[in-house]
Image (cartoon, rainbow, N blue to C red):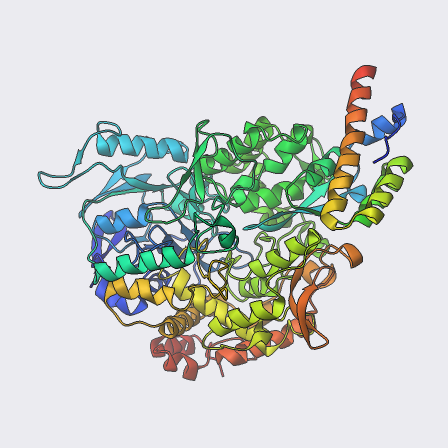
Amino acid sequence: MRKLKDPSRELVKRILTEVDFEDRLEGFSLRERSGPMPVTMYSFREVVSLLQEPYPRIDFIELEIWVRKTVDDPELADQIAEAIKKGHSDQERTHSIRDLMGERLKQCKRLNQANS
Amino acid sequence: MNGYAGKILRINLTDRKTSTIDTKEYEQWVGGHGMGSAIFWDLVKDKTINGFDPRNVITIMTSPLSGTLAPGASGRTEVQGVGAQSYPIEWFTRSNFGGRFSAMLKYAGWDGIVIEGKADKPVWVDIRNEDVTIKDARRLWGLDTWKTQEEIWKEVSGRGFSGWLELDSERRTTQRPAVLTIGPAGENLSRTACLIHDAGNAAGQGGFGGIWGSKNLKAISVIGTGSIKIADPKALMEARLWAQKKYSTDVNNLDASWFAHFGRRKPQNLFWDKQEKARLSSCIGCHIGCKERTDTSYGNESICVETSFYAYWDKSKHGGKQTPAAYIAADLLQKYGINAYEATRGLTYIRALERMGILGRGKKIDCDLDFRRLGETEFADQFLKMIAFRRGVGDDFAEGFVRAAKRWGRLEEDLKTGILYYSYWGLPEHSYDPRAEVEWGYGSILGDRDINEHDFNFLFWWPSGAIWAGKTPRPPAEQVVKIIAEKLVPYENDPSMLDYSTDNIYSEPMAKLVAWHRHYTRFWKESVLYCDQRWPDFINTRIPGYRGLTGEGEPRFLNAVTGNKFNFVDGMELGRKIWNLDNAIWILQGRHRDMVHFSDYIYHVPYKGTGKYAWYYLPGRENGQWKYIQVNNRSLDKAKFEEFKTRFYKLEGWDVRTGWPRRKTLESLGLKYVADELERNGKSGA
């Protein structure tokens, strides 16, 4: 994982803001008795949370496009694309993307705190 | 009558009188659901009544195994009656809960309870062995389910929880009464309201909490000092040891038990991050503890869906950490007595409406909830209170979210897009979606509710988990379907029944799988009351060859208790009979094949996940070869589902035009009186 550059103030704002219904992302959290519980996500933070679940499922391509177009974070989207390509399994891809997005969220929270 | 107490308690709330039914009159149904359906059939003359009608009869039934040492069977109780939750018709339905109520009822000398009528004021029922008193419940009305139980425990046991409770000069116990109660949601006639027993055992589906509320029935408490006569105690103990030694977790070799449905390496069924200090807790007589009690006292005994209700939102709000918010939210569900699936799917739905700008403060659907606080305890409490006390727009939520959507003029549209994730009969989708795991969806739409029977889900878990982790699933699909197919008597040795490929999901073999499933669960799980968490045991990795105990285990325990010579096929046939009786009730309520359809999105919106990164795998044949195939990205074909229904009705011996059982079929099952009643109502299958 390459180090992500510090995001701009605008990007921090976008990442920490909820998206509208049309821009939502959908995934699943698998639980043995309840099955694949659908999770509708309206923020970057919620996506990170899903990826931190024990058995998350998300369409990687949809996610990459969401980060690129909706969040407008091409640097992160490129790294996600690379993680998808390099991963040997979906589990590995999920964990790499989780770490990347988690790192980006941390940066945003830190900068947001510093700016407020 | 070995295994039985011998009598069923009949309570008429209208005139506050009690009487008894001789269990022998219904012994042919064995117990649980079968007995409940038969009693309902006999006592409810007009089957078209709705759930809140005082003429509705609620049965609470045990089985011969209740209160015995039969593993994973002792603690379940079956609840039936006309429900309040399904839409558009309030089907005759069922629910089921664990704990110790069924055992205590048997120890008190009762095989079940039949509730009739409606009290003019709030009451609770105090059962102490054969003594039954209907008491004023006005002081309990308004209390949550936990407080209600505490108050009843105090009243019955007098001295708190220590020491002996003397029921008379010769009979005493150290046990506290088993109480089944409603919370504020039930009192306020919510269609999402549950019956709650102890901390976290709920009869969740059907809206039975609201129905009790409509009858002014707050609680039933039971304490007993008797015992159950077992036909062959030695055979029962030997059977239990046989099952434990052969099929349960091998503590000296845990890896061998990586999948042993009957006994698990990690038995807890929790969807939140475990609390640090906790110990296992189980239903009475169970060999496995799937619940927990914790040193924080939060989340005690909650398992399954209620533990997932708020876990994700809590973590999302708190930087990925699980905080007490998730556990407390589950406790609130239990205390207010609210169905966790309605709350979970409902919350997702109203959040979508909020993001669409339709719901919120001053919006078209005026709602005070501040979604910025989603994940905090206060938000969960506010949301659940709105349902339980019908506050503000909570008056709509309390009707269940399908009826709420109807009130808001959104039902058709939101079932078309699927943002209202309710697949069958206006009920929340479980998550084993009909578009992927068809036997679950078919069973639900051909029945009365989300079946919530996990018998075949491991067929998804094994391959889906392994492939996601980059491993080859083991055992291979061909071996798995072969082992299971052997056990699917009377349709045994047809692996096509387990072929989930799109070409096969409307086929006759799939109809056979659905029929097998309906018959198996109606008898073995809902009448004999084997727990869904532990039964059936098709595949068991502890056994060389992986053949689990299903087929042999179910009758072995039952026969040891009753002394009868009942075999597995007898049970399947009785399950078919009960299934036919239930269908006859639904038909009298208004069912016709034309209304047996999923919500629109099931036919028009493909299940998520496409192409290379799909993740839902099930066994199926591709080019003649068995493999684990991916079933994401499919929707059901409505016309082909019609063909499936025809095949299913034909297989069941029902009229394919109407879906109504034919006289010949009913008579062959010993249900001539049912055929006569259908005919009198002009609803005989041709």
The quadrant where residue B151 appears:
top left
Vertical placement of B281 versus B461: above or below? above
Work out whether residue B464 or residue B320 is closer to the camera in this orientation and state it: B464
* Residue most extreme to the left: B169
Work out whether residue B490 or residue B200 is closer to the camera in this orientation and state it: B490
Q: Residue at x 64, y 77 (%)?
A: B643
Residue B68 shown left or right of residue A78 in the figure: left
Vertical placement of B370 versus B246: above or below? above
Work out whether residue B330 or residue B547 is closer to the camera in this orientation and state it: B547
Work out whether residue B400 or residue A104 is closer to the camera in this orientation and state it: A104
Vertical placement of B445 versus A51: above or below? below
Q: Residue at x 81, y 15 (%)?
A: A114
* Residue most extreme to the front: B252
Horizontal and vertical percent for residue B436? 65, 61
Residue B604 shown left or right of residue A13 in the figure: left
Q: Dividing the image into 4 quarters, which one contains the N terminus of chain B?
A: bottom left
Horizontal and vertical percent for residue B589? 47, 65
Vertical placement of B320 versus B660: above or below? above
The quadrant where residue B596 appears:
bottom right
Q: Is residue B370 visible?
A: no
Q: Is residue B80 visible?
A: yes
- In this rendering, the count of numbered labels is 0
Horizontal and vertical percent for residue B88? 56, 58
Horizontal and vertical percent for residue B68? 28, 53
